[in-house]
Image (spheres, coloured by chain):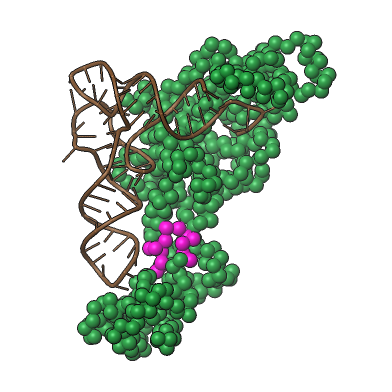
Chain colours: A green, B brown
Amino acid sequence: MRYNYGKGWRLQYMTQDEIRVRFAPSPTGPFHIGGARSALFNWLLARKMGGKLILRIEDTDLERSTKESEENIKEALKWLGMTWDEGIDIGGEYGPYRQTERLDIYQKYTEELLAKGLAYHCYCTDEELEKDRQQQMANGETPHYLGRCSHLTKESEAKFIAEGRKPTVRFRVPPNQQIVFTDLVRGTVSFESNGVGDFVIVKSDGIPVYNYAVVIDDALMKMTHVIRAEEHLSNTPRQLLIYDALGFKRPEFGHISLILGKDRTKMSKRHGATSVQQYRDLGYLPEALVNFLALLGWSPVGEQEIFSLEELIQAFSMDRVAKNPAVFDVDKLNYINATYIKQASPECVLELALPHLQAAGYVDGTLTAEKRAWLMEVMTAVKEHLSYGAQVVDHVDIFFNEDVQFESEEAAEVLRDEDASQVIEVFKEKMAALETVDAASVKKVLKSIVKELKLGGKKVYMPLRVAMTGKMHGPDLDHIIPIIGREKVMARINATMAKM
RNA sequence: GGCCCUAUGGUCGAGAGGUUUAAGACGCCGCCCUCUCAAGGCGGAGGCAGGGGUUCAAUUCCCCUUAGGGCUACCA
């Protein structure tokens, strides 16, 4: 058995009315790829089980939260193809879905905790707290609040208030308790309450802290499963204590491991692109990114690796989520994206590539229908070579640049071959005689030259390739030629030969 | 420092005590195809972190060590 509770939980929840899961990001910066994966697993679980996905915004960090980040998250989720059933924008039975709009709700529970003596006001200053922390660390103890304000007399409390101190609210952690829960991906996890220490649940400005608000929201919003990143695992005991103190039913927890960079530390900017937006801007396809993310920490039963969204939903299950952290492997992402690009329509590839073609100055903002059609042919020729959209600029100069430059001395050498000029002469004649110039007719021409001149294919193709592109490599010649067009091909060849 | 999580090739990972000669994929190397580069096809190299147990049998269960990560905030 992989987990000591077996697979029963799945049955248990299949018979329940509905699964309710949430994705609850804090809008404090670019939408991280790890957040996208958390969202994905929740979304997949909800869709698989016919449940609901709730999108809640955890914006209690007033300094760092921005509306812009929130928009960013929504856009990214939509782009990736994930939709939510309740939450910001669309509302629902358990709203509001933005924590700063729920302050009155939290306050009600805070008063309850205070009244029951399960929480208390703390007037300690940052300096005092920091001093305690230093000392405990020096003593080799788990730093935690010493409880200085836990039993304040009315007099001293009045004195602090008179001094103008703004209190925080601390949760009174019961001593000598074992906090145990069963994690969907990790099995039984246990903590000692003694290691926790009374923690702040409401800041001195009256705003609740994450560990507190999250519990009230998840409970009130009737979450059945909390699937989130492993960084929250160590916070879970604190949250469990609050569930119990408030008499809430505990949901199931599942902590999925973190996504690491190449050096096995948490993914950060120095590992390259870390936000969903960056991958979109680089010209990755949302389906490919989702496919890749799904495989990072989850594995399907069979050997299939390329999954559509629908197939992922069918195949997904929480009991195949891995416990160990996963290194983000761009090579594999590129491979997956490349396979999606190969299957994609020219229109779709053009869409990925267009911003990069524009940035490189190959095309300007306005595209005529004719130009667009031509670009699609170019895309068809190069899409086999692309891992992502931005790479297009490495492959298209041969279609845009009429001034042929040899990429190397080796290339120039090809045209000095004894048979080169004859090949080119024959090619020009045959091309001129052609009624329609397309891949099939060009291919016929090229083959006939090989045959008639009794030369190897290399001796025929390479001089022509170099004469019209200056390069030794590129897409198939019979594809390139119709795209460049007969006139320009001729002009290029003539110009190149004149230089010899 | 304390607490918690994790440990199969370079990477993602299958594996649920004997079915393993340890899947599959990416990457790497070679061959084929081919005008070239890709793509595609075929093949190859490469791994159970170390040490103790438990057991007739351990990659699989337990313990320790080591390594990595997370938490330890009036961040989330």
Magenta residues: mostly which secondary structure? helix
Q: Is residue A285 left or right of residue A449?
A: right
Q: Is residue A49 left or right of residue A94?
A: left
Q: Is residue A220 above or below residue A271?
A: above
The residue at 70%/21% (across/down) is: A128
The residue at 77%/14% (across/down) is: A157
Q: Is residue A246 above or below residue A316?
A: above
The residue furthest front is A138
Q: Is residue A441 visible?
A: no
Q: Position of residue A298 (x, y in %)?
A: 39, 38
Frontmost residue, A485 versus A122: A122
> Which of the 4 quarters of the picture holds residue A412?
bottom left
The range drawn in magenta is A380-393
The residue at 38%/59% (across/down) is: A343
Task: State yes or no: residue A382 in magenta.
Answer: yes
Q: Is residue A11 left or right of residue A225?
A: left
Frontmost residue, A356 versus A5: A356
